[in-house]
């Protein structure tokens, strides 16, 4: 098992970077070929803002003394967490670990909508007036730090294997860009895929300007938590082409620049 750990640690950063760039390029191409909606804001400006946010957020998270993978190894070495104290095949522990982390992120997402102090930072994600692949990486650096803290707590509680952490982070990156894609899927195919993974049509509802709609469909990777916990909504009332994306009190494109988004949580009321 030491060989698996060493391989994962050696290649994890490369795997995540290649996955990120590959999915971003693939989804960007798909959006050109088969767009779901007509974008209303200048694409170049939005992309620059959203990409700058993820690069800045990633840099800030990297300043932390511990990263998720290192904490998973530490938990393993010290016998912390549930999965480090039960006798299961490694691959089963890894699968359970991925599911547990995904549930934690679902609960975190719902909490970020429910608690005003957290919503202040998460609303930056929802201020995007359009919905495309880069919306899936539009997160305030403070939200990324909070999310990392919650993820680390889950790793310690569950004793998540390091392989599960890497798989989950690659999945979360990839599925976040996929389910925020401005892409068209045939209805029948979408209904099948959303049984296993959150699709763009499923998650787009969550970005509706209507409060009851954006307080639904919190899942990023797997769709099951929304169905099990009663937060699933099949489609927006106005339809996917006619629905309004964003927040009702942030409609000025000129006020959604990178500097203003960075200070937004500190100067604006956290109203939905």
Image: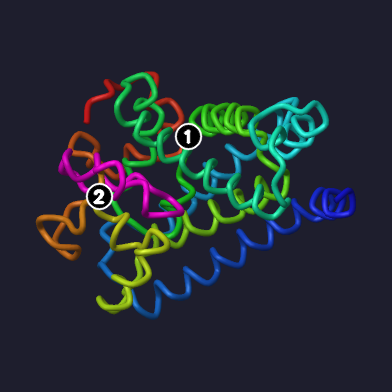
Q: Which mark is residue 140?
A: 1
Asked which quadrant contains residue 119, the reply is top left
Q: Secondary structure at mark 2?
A: loop
Residue at 53%, 50% (x, y): give it. 51
Picture coordinates of residue 21 (x, y %)? 62, 62
Asked which quadrant contains residue 52, the reply is top right
Circle count: 2
Q: Is residue 58 left or right of residue 212?
A: right
Q: Is residue 224 above or below residue 155?
A: below
Q: Is residue 36 above or below residue 242?
A: below
Picture coordinates of residue 121 (x, y %)? 41, 28
Q: Which mark is residue 36?
A: none
Q: Is residue 248 magenta?
A: no
Q: Nearer the viewer, mark 2 or mark 1?
A: 2
Q: Is residue 224 magenta?
A: yes
Residue named by callout 2: 232
Task: Classify mark 1: residues with Cα within 10 Å, few (<14), some (14-19) or many (20+).
Answer: many
Asked which quadrant contains residue 122, the reply is top left
Kindly give the residue lying farthest to the front in the view shown: 87
Camera-side residue of 99 and 68: 99
Residue at 83%, 31% (x, y): give it. 77
Camera-side residue of 126 and 79: 79
Q: Is residue 55 above or below residue 134?
A: above
The colour scheme of the drawn protein is rainbow
Picture coordinates of residue 90 (x, y %)? 73, 51
Q: Secondary structure at mark 1?
A: loop
Residue at 27%, 78% (x, y): give it. 188
Kindly give the residue lying farthest to the left in the view shown: 238
- What whole-number distance in Å separates the C-alpha atoms at marks 2 and 1? 25 Å
Task: Classify mark 2: residues with Cα within 10 Å, few (<14), some (14-19) or many (20+).
Answer: many
Q: Which residues are magenta?
A: 208-230
**Of callouts 2 and 1, the N-terminal one:** 1
């Amino acid at each position: 098992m030491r060989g698996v750990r060493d391989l994962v640690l050696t290649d994890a950063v490369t795997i995540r970077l290649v996955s990120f760039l590959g999915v971003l390029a693939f989804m960007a191409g798909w959006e050109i070929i088969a767009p779901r909606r007509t974008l209303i804001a200048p694409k170049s400006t939005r992309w620059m803002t959203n990409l700058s946010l993820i690069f800045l957020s990633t840099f800030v998270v990297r300043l932390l003394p511990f990263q998720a993978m290192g904490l998973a190894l530490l938990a393993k070495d010290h016998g912390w967490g549930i999965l480090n104290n039960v006798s299961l095949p490694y691959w089963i522990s890894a699968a359970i670990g991925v599911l547990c982390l995904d549930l934690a992120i679902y609960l975190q997402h719902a909490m970020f909508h429910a608690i005003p102090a957290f919503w202040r930072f998460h609303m930056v994600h929802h201020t995007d007036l359009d919905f495309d692949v880069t919306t899936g990486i539009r997160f305030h650096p403070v939200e990324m730090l909070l999310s990392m803290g919650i993820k680390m707590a889950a790793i310690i509680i569950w004793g998540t294997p390091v392989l599960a952490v890497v798989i989950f982070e690659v999945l979360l990156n990839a599925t976040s860009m996929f389910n925020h894609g401005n892409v068209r899927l045939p209805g029948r195919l979408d209904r099948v895929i959303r049984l296993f993974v959150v699709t763009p049509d499923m998650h787009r509802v969550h970005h509706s300007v209507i409060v009851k709609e954006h307080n639904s469909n919190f899942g990023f990777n797997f769709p099951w938590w929304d169905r099990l916990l009663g937060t699933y909504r099949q489609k927006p009332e106005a339809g996917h082409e006619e629905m309004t994306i964003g927040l009702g009190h942030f409609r000025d494109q000129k006020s959604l620049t990178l500097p203003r988004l960075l200070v937004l949580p500190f100067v604006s009321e956290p109203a939905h």
